[in-house]
């Protein structure tokens, strides 16, 4: 894994958000994150409380392998 600068990470992150959500929804997502303190390590636990790590990983892989539209 190559280490990238913080600036490059932020740029790539916003590019991914825009590609996945569109400009308006990406901006909305960032706004929601910045509204209050956000623990990105706790967020997945709260998002899928009834799923195991293996189930979440499986869902992520299914999404990754799904053809893009």
Image: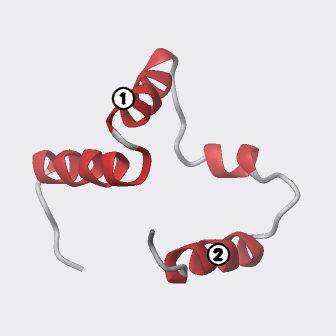
- Of residues 63 and 10, the one nearer the viewer is 63
| Mark 1 → mark 2, Cα distance in angstroms | 26 Å
Q: What residue would you read off at disc 2?
A: 57
Residue at image location 21% in from the left, 54% down from the top: 12
Quarter of the image where the N terminus is located: bottom left
How many residues crowd around disc 1 within 10 Å: few (fewer than 14), some, or many (20 or more)? some
The image quarter containing residue 39 is: top right
* Up/down of 23 relative to 48, above or below: above
Labelled disc at residue 18: none
Q: What residue would you read off at disc 1?
A: 27
Q: Kindly check if marks 1 and 2 are in contact, taking CB atoms under 8 A apart as contact.
A: no
- Locate residue 14 relative to residue 37 in the image: left or right: left
Q: Which percent across, then down, holds residue 35?
A: 48, 16
* Up/down of 12 relative to 69, above or below: above
Q: Which percent across, then down, holds residue 66?
A: 54, 79
Between discs 1 and 2, the one toward the N terminus: 1
Q: Which percent across, then down, holds residue 6?
A: 16, 48
């Amino acid at each position: 894994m190559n280490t990238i600068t913080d600036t490059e990470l932020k740029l790539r992150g916003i590019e991914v958000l825009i590609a996945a959500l569109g400009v308006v929804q990406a901006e909305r997502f960032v706004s929601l994150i910045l509204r209050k303190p956000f623990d990105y390590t706790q967020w997945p636990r709260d998002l899928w409380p009834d799923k195991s790590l293996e189930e979440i990983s499986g869902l992520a892989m299914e999404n990754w392998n799904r053809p893009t539209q």
